[in-house]
Amino acid sequence: MTTTLMNHAPPPPALIAAHKRRARRRGRVIALAFALPALLLLGALVVYPVLFSVGRSFFDASGDRFVGTGNYSEMFRDPTTLKAIRNTTIWVIAAPTLLTGLGLLLAVLVEKIRWATAFKLLLFMPMAVSFLAAGIIFRLAYDQDPSKGVLNATVVSVHDAFKGTSPYPTARIRDGQGLTRSSDGSYRTRAGSTPGHTVSLPLVGVLPKDLPKGAAPAAGAAGRKAMPDELRGVVYLDFTPGGAGTPGRVDRRESGLPGVKVEAVQHGRTVAHTQTAADGSFDFSGLHGGSYTLKLPASNFAPPYQGVSWLGPALVTPAIIGAYLWIWTGFSMVLISAGLAALPRDALEAARMDGAGEWQIFRRITVPLLAPVLTVVFVTLVINVMKVFDLVYIIAPGPVQENATVLATQMWLVSFGGGNNQGLGSALGVLLLALVTPAMIFNVRRFRRSQR
């Protein structure tokens, strides 16, 4: 009996501790073996480039001469780099704020509609489009030519619907034919005209295919006689197909110009105005005696409205931010919707039972409870915005590239896009890393706190 108990006695504590130490060492070795490929990739693709860029930033463009902090000093003296810092600041302030606000608004509204899932899918779809493809799409959408750019086509259509367009933007006078151009762009008769006469006002520069559909020959209108108190005239296209006509005279095959505004001016004041008929004819009745100057206002010949220069120096950065919003709004909405679904419904219902309105519930309960989610979304977007490159490089045309440049594009342009100064480019990269790092640390700490 005694022998049996001795054979089953527990091992000594020292042996147990040694066994545990060996097990822990074996576990660390196995974990390291599994993590080693990832660590090698991380070192080769992240750690080494960062350290190399930091070191390279202290050398000149050739990489042979040590310049210390010279590249950093030059970076803050260069006007283009300062403009890139300014644009990056605009991006960091505007884009994450707008995206977080839009995501919150859409998440709250989508929760109340029947087809919420389909709507979320529709808004999230742009995330599947690469930045390259999105840049090409918006480069075309922002094109100033209304026949190509959908935004300007819409703007021009709305403008023309309310203000109309000039009927003959290409029309001009023929030299020596009785009309002269004024400084305001209008045309006037050189000599005065008195009631009882018919005046011919020839114009050229209008293609026959651009004439209005109802345009009629002007010969009949030119042959009509005016009453004693009437001043008649005809505005016509002084061009005969085939070139057989006589300049300054209304030929049988020449067309009148309908829809032209005509004014009768006496002593520097417009006393009457009218508009030409289909054959280009016009008349002023009941005029008092005296001489009148006939005027064709500049509005007849104003160039067509071309819309908004979306990619001009003034609007290129807001336009690119708009493209960025199109891509990332779905991401922001989906994350905030997930946080919204996790809110305690009893708090919302209790507020409603206490008589709180929807706006009060949103402002005093929903937003405070969603604050951690909103913070994570905002900081994540800040990190992404600081690294934006594709959209800026693709959407901004060459002449305004400098007006739209951000730190990422400036770093590439200085290093590889013609500057060939990798010392300065590395300094820009280090600056970008220094700006992104605090946001990354903040996000990591929030994740750790949420896990606890």
Image (cartoon, rainbow, N blue to C red):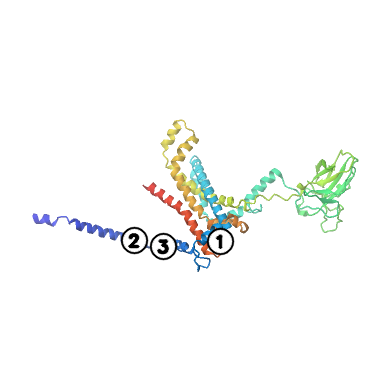
The residue sitting at the bottom extreme is 64
Q: Quick check: marks 2 and 3 in contact, CB under 8 Å? A: no
Residue shown at the point (11%, 56%) measured from the top left: 4
One can see residue 349 in this view: yes
Check disc 2: other Cα within 10 Å, few if <14, some if 14-19, many if 20+: few
Q: Disc 2 or 3, which lies upstream in sequence? A: 2
Label 2 and label 3: CA atoms lie apart by: 15 Å
From the image, which quarter does the N terminus lie in?
bottom left
Of the residues tagged 2 and 3, which is closer to the observer?
Answer: 3
From what the image shows, is residue 288 above or below residue 126?
above
Circle 3 sits in a helix, a strand or a loop, which is it? helix
Q: Amino acid at mark 1?
A: Leu
Return the residue at label 2: 32
Q: Is residue 121 left or right of residue 36?
A: right
Quarter of the rendering containing residue 79: bottom right
Residue closest to the eye, 121 or 347: 347
Q: Disc 2 or 1, which lies upstream in sequence? A: 2
One can see residue 340 in this view: no
Residue shown at the point (41%, 62%) measured from the top left: 43
Label 1 and label 3: CA atoms lie apart by: 26 Å
Check disc 1: other Cα within 10 Å, few if <14, some if 14-19, many if 20+: some
Return the residue at label 1: 413
Label 2 and label 1: CA atoms lie apart by: 40 Å
Quarter of the rendering containing residue 75: bottom right
Residue 43's label in the rendered image is: 3
Q: Amino acid at mark 3?
A: Gly
Residue 82: x and y, percent? 56, 55
Q: Amino acid at mark 2?
A: Leu
Circle 2 sits in a helix, a strand or a loop, which is it? helix
